[in-house]
Image (cartoon, grey):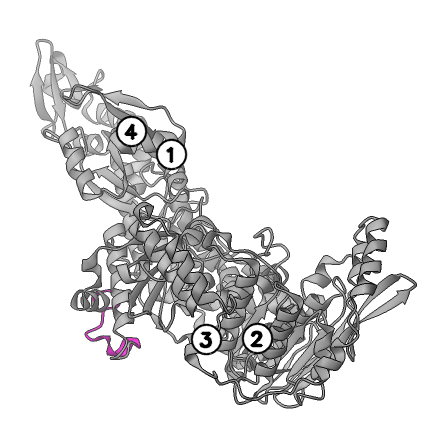
Amino acid sequence: MMAQYMEVKNQYKDCILFYRLGDFYEMFFDDALTASRELEITLTGRDCGQEERAPMCGVPYHACDIYINKLIEKGYKVAICEQMEDPKLAKGLVKREVIRIVTPGTNMSQAILDETRNNYLMCIFGCNEEYGLAVCDITTGEFRSCHVSSTAKLYDEINKYSPTEIIGNGAFLSCDLNFDYMKEKMKITISEAPSHYFNDDTCEDFIKRQFKVGSIDGLGIEDDQEDILISVGALLQYLHETQKNSLDHINRMDVYSIEDYMIIDSSSRRNLELTETLRDKQKRGSLLWVMDKTKTAMGARMLRNMIEQPLIHKDDIEARLDAIAELNNSVIDRDEIREYLNTIYDLERLMTRISLRTANPRDLLAFKTSIHLLPAIIQLLGNFYSDGLTEIREGIDDLHDLYELLDRAIVDEPPILIREGGIFKDGYLEDIDTLKNATTDGKNWIAELETREREKTGIKNLKIKFNKVFGYYFDVTNSYKSLVPDYFIRKQTLANSERYTTEELDRLAGVILGSSDKLVALEYNTYVELRDTLAAELTRVQRTAHNIAMLDALCSLSYVAIKNGYVRPDINNDGVINIKDGRHPVVEKMLNNDMFITNDTYLNNHESRISIITGPNMAGKSTYMRQTALIVLMAQVGSFVPAASADIGICDRIFTRVGASDDLASGQSTFMVEMSEVANILRNATKNSLLILDEIGRGTSTYDGLAIAWAVVEYISNSELLGAKTLFATHYHELTELEGKLSAVNNYCIAVKEDGDDIVFLRKIVKGGADRSYGIQVAKLAGVPDVVIARANEICNQLIDKDITTKLKEIKITNDFKPKNDDTQMSMFGSLAESQVIEDIKCVDLSNMTPMKALLYLNELQERLK
């Protein structure tokens, strides 16, 4: 047995092997040491022919999911080695095989999965700093792929999907990403896949077999997208090798371009708190928390995906808005639909379990309940005529035949386990009914036959008896042998009696003897056939589930729109953003007294491209800018927005640079992080982007920071270089001098009411610039001691340089952003950068540096010299 264990373990060295022994899954050697520590279970030992006992621990097979989930949450992989034959019938050693490998990205346990979000597994194939990306949720069958042209964009896609597991090739694992952060903070399990996964021909063969096509031409993979082909094929190989199943529910693939949706980089997702808060990583306080009033798990996942991927095509946006407007106009019908949706379980994941043959009888009961009211939903949708809702209605199959089948078959309270029996209703299958009756009425049948034959033959003492050797038989004493009829068949002769049987008695005995075991076996086989019948309807159910999810998401957006007083935005391609009385969708819900102050926003591609916003801290600048970004994003999701009116020009990207944070893990200071994000924005934004920039340049000296902020505004305002619509909040009120010098710049400030040394924030954006930051007054409001406040005022009065405004007025605006001399450009580290690098190299202790640290240090030096 231990030899068999070691043979299996050698094939799955990167997994903890759950080795089935009777009623337990056992682990040995290093696996046992790891499992006992991580699961906090008792470590024992077992003699295995060696000097020392083999470390050993185990868990009950019926509760293994609990322990597997704990290991998966800690980032381990688990290989389940099952007994493939009945130990009672096995000749010699019981045959065992690994039937499935459970990993973070392939775990389908309902206990560990969040039903409102997808559990994504991602495969990344890197080549020449470009990447093919494939992502799959095995629990729903969703499969998507795209080409990514840079490491930065790859990181954004990883943040968008938030996979629990990533596999990749060596080129990906050596790219410039902070893998430690992804593993520790983002909780992503990352591993290198075997090299044979990335063979072109093998990948193409897997794709053809999985999607049942003769050629990949119709799948959306272009001839020059070899990286997509390899990432998709490698992911499919990984799924097949871990699941050891046909995976029929993965039957379509969506090849998309990143540019098909609004691009939101990772820092902007965090800053805007789309699906979780920045501080606590909780849903409450995020945009999703406000917008998600869905009734089904499928709808919740759909809505999350809609928020993560806003649209950029006007017709698609208008189609969603039309659907929401129509739902708003028929609130009674909408609410009735929502009530029906409330009875629908997770059809996508239920159908996956049915397709993978892991669904239990209660899953089938949930499936029946879920499809029961589909005809009523279809009927209600007949009252709507928008293209979006019409398309949904046409995409929903009432599945009435499947409902009738399940209604006839499954009892109202079925067992969880399929080998316990008691699954089917009376009348579904005659043989099952017969066996059921046999287990309860067998004695009555025997007594009735005995009475009938006694009266028929005239043998007064005729009895039916039973023993383990001969089973059931008629016992006739010798005194009545002459009355035995011809159809009695002799079984045994005794001294004082004869034992007989009849065809009817043999038939009854066959039914009664072992009827319980036969009933369980028959019910199991019948259940498997029923489940296979449902699995054959996979495509119908998946299409219906997708449309139910979209309907639920749209109904949620409609419900939120009416409840919160949102309006339908107008959508334009002219670059105009005109918001009247806009509100922050989250902040207004967090305020209990309805005291949120509304504000207007106007931006266009010409004279109002950039708004310089000044005013004190805590006055509402960041809230105002974020609300503008969120209103634009909500509009492009296809949602109504929190405003009196809104005309939204479609933005291809939203970038935010808000707040201060260190990235100590990669050795970057607050200012370095800030400048890196600014660099990313300036390099990747377009004239159709919306930029939210808060406190650029605050992490360095006043003059350096002011100079950087000034230059950034100049660069953005130049339509030939960038020309993006921008909200730029700053405490450098000197930047208000740019209004008039740059035609695209306009000054705004937060209105403040002064009362002596005190201030009151009015939280209203007004035209004009502030000439003060009120920092000392804010410090006073925060509770800084009065003596410190007094001294700060004294020092401030001495430091104020009244000539700085004059000097700023003398600065000439430039449109020339070309490098003067590439060989002599200074880095942000100052004019002595190169000499400082040389000095640092002289001090490096190479003898105590690993090759990896040397490469990282060399990369750092290179970045500094850039």
Q: Which mark is residue 63?
A: 1
User: Which residue is labeled 3 in the image?
Assistant: 394
Give above or below for 166 relative to 574: above
Taking depth in this image into account, of 804 and 471 the one nearest to the observer is: 804
Q: Which mark is residue 199?
A: none
Q: Residues within 10 Å of mark 1 (few under 14, many from 20)?
A: few
Q: Which residues are magenta?
A: 209-220
- Image quarter in which the N terminus is found: top left
Q: Which amino acid, mark 4? A: Asp
Mark 2 in CB contact with mark 1 (< 8 angstroms): no
Give residue 638's mark.
2
Side (left or right) of 370 relative to 514: right
* Residue hosting label 4: 23
Nearest to N terminus: mark 4 or mark 2: 4
Of pointers 1 and 3, the one earlier in the residue sequence = 1
Q: What residue is at 34 percent from the left and 36 percent from the top? A: 420
Give yes or no for residue 144 being in the magenta stretch.
no
Q: Where does residue 104 sit, x and y in percent of width and height?
A: 37, 49
